[in-house]
Image: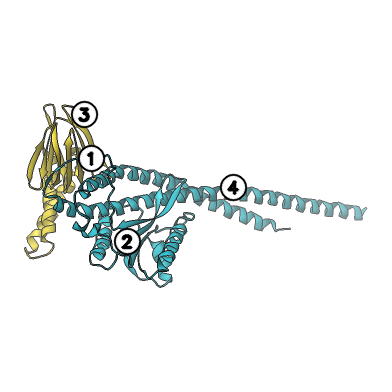
Chain colours: A cyan, B yellow
């Protein structure tokens, strides 16, 4: 029979853990709300940007811009987006798993893979496996457009210089607090949205010329995409943490209930033994 | 869709800043200011730092804008900007501080310095904010 004092200690430790997980869950819930709002608010800009690009791209030959040009995928860059902090269930592990299987699939050919990471978790994971990073950034938990811009710029530079032939991103797409999809998306070369067959592109006046505009808009479109991936990843992180902490809190409640039962039983047993001893002692005196 | 108004939408990467029905828009294009009235032919251009003004009836309103794009299509106009601020959202103190900071830096560095144009642009943005806030 377990020692009464030990059980009491266990109970209080489980209870204090529960307080922590409960607090983390509530913090994650409020952060999730904010992150979700930023995802939703950032959408009009991103969608419109894609539309403008599509309407421009149909008018310009694919060879006109290096970022639209397709090459044989010999050197592939993979950008892995994770969080800095843990305690969010399988969030980071899942992204890393998807990244690993992507690399395995692509690595079987003659392709060379270059790695870039955002977030401490991915960085630590791959550093332990002796990877070198092209780009290495932390993920502070709030997306910043200028950060997305600088990341996007280095990715574009490498692509234009021929250091990479394609760029993919492994990140978590935000659907809702409960569902998140881990996806590996191609960032470069760019594939502008095609107009439907019966859709007639609107004839625009351009100022400056369409080539100049296109050259200006394409990089910006990449930054926007990186930015929205960051936003989605952050929202997913909070969602994932919220669910993980919620179930941790529930588990802690269950654990306390079990331990309390155990404790009461042990206490009862101790009392019974003690009574028996007294009774038998008294009997012996008579 | 025939109409006598323009649906003006302004969005920055962070959020949609404005979505209103207006009678006229005057925006700072890279190659000079341009005005848009209802029924304007489809038009795509770049927008540079400055003030975007729109008219509702006889009322003129201003927005401080920075680099971006404007797409006009007959009765709607969409402006995508790096940053856009309504007069009420501008923190005058902060803008004033940014202006002083940029001016200080500009006084120190020479024209050849690679940061010169960045600082100049920062000054430009700060001045622009101040002007819009004071209108």
Tell me if mark 2 has few (under 14), some (14-19) or many (20+) residues whose alpha carbon lies within 10 angstroms of its own.
many
Query: Percent position (x, y) of residue B68?
Result: 18, 47
Q: How busy is the neighbourhood of tag 3: few (under 14 within 10 Å), some, or many (20 plus)?
A: few
Where residue A24 appears, x then y in whole percent? 46, 50
The answer, for residue B33, to whether it is visible in the render is yes
Front: mark 1 or 4 = 1
Of residue A41 and residue A219, the one placed in the foreground of this image is A219
* Residue hosting label 4: A253
Question: Which label lies toward us, 1 or 2?
Answer: 1
Apparent side of residue A235 relative to residue B71 in the rendered image (left or right)? right
Question: Which numbered disc, 2 or 4, marks the residue closer to the eye?
Answer: 2
Q: Are marks 1 and 4 on the same chain?
A: yes
Q: Which residue bears the numbered disc 2?
A: A167
Residue plotted at (73% across, 53% down): A266
Horizontal side, residue B23 vs residue A78: left or right: left
Q: Rounded to the nearest whole Å, what is the CA distance between mark 2 and mark 3?
A: 42 Å
Which residue is identified by label 1?
Answer: A200
Q: Earlier in the sequence, mark 1 or mark 2?
A: 2
Q: What residue is pinned by disc 3?
A: B1
Residue A219 in picture, x, y percent from top left: 22, 55
Residue located farthest toward the right when viewing the structure as drawn: A286
Q: Nearer the viewer, mark 1 or mark 3?
A: 1
Marks 1 and 2, how far apart at CA: 31 Å
Q: Which chain is mark 3 on?
A: B
Dot 2 falls on which chain? A
Q: Secondary structure at mark 2?
A: strand
Same chain assignment for discs 2 and 4: yes
Q: Earlier in the sequence, mark 1 or mark 4?
A: 1
* Chain under disc 1: A
Q: Are marks 1 and 2 on the same chain?
A: yes
Whole-Å distance between the Cαs marked 4 and 3? 61 Å
């Amino acid at each position: 029979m377990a020692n009464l004092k030990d059980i009491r200690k266990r109970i209080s430790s489980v209870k204090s853990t529960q307080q922590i997980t409960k607090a983390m869950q509530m913090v994650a819930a409020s952060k999730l709300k904010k992150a979700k709002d930023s995802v939703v608010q950032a959408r009009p800009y991103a969608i419109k940007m894609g539309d403008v690009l599509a309407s421009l791209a149909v008018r310009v030959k694919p060879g006109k811009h290096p970022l639209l040009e397709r090459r044989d995928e010999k050197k592939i860059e993979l950008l892995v987006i994770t969080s800095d902090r843990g305690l969010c269930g399988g969030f980071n592990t899942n992204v890393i798993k998807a990244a690993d299987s992507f690399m395995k699939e692509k690595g079987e050919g003659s392709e060379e893979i270059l790695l870039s990471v955002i977030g401490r978790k991915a960085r630590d994971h791959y550093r332990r496996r002796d990877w070198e990073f092209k780009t290495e950034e932390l993920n502070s938990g709030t997306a910043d457009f200028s950060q997305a811009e600088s990341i996007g710029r280095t990715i574009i530079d490498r692509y234009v210089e021929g250091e990479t032939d394609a760029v993919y991103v492994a990140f978590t797409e935000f659907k809702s607090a409960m569902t998140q999809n881990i996806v590996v998306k191609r960032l470069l070369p760019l594939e502008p949205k095609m107009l439907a067959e019966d859709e007639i592109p609107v004839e625009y006046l351009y100022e400056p010329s369409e080539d100049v505009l296109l050259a200006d808009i394409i990089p910006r479109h990449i930054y926007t995409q990186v930015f929205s991936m960051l936003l989605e990843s952050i929202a997913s992180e909070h969602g994932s943490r919220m669910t993980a902490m919620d179930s941790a809190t529930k588990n802690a409640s269950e654990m306390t209930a079990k331990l309390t039962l155990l404790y009461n039983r042990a206490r009862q047993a101790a009392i019974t033994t003690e009574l028996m001893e007294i009774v038998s002692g008294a009997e012996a005196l008579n | 869709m025939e109409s006598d108004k323009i649906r003006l939408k302004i969005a920055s990467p962070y959020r949609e800043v404005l979505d209103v029905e207006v009678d006229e828009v005057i925006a700072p294009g890279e190659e000079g200011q341009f005005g848009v009235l209802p029924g304007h032919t489809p038009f795509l251009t770049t927008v540079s730092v400055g003030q975007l003004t729109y008219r509702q009836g006889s009322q003129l309103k201003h927005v401080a804008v920075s680099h971006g794009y404007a797409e006009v299509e007959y009765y709607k106009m969409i402006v995508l900007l790096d940053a856009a601020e309504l007069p009420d959202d501008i923190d005058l103190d902060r803008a004033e501080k940014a202006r002083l900071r940029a001016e200080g830096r500009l006084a120190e560095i020479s024209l050849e310095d690679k940061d010169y144009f960045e600082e100049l642009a920062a000054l430009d943005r700060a001045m622009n904010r101040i002007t819009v806030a004071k209108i």
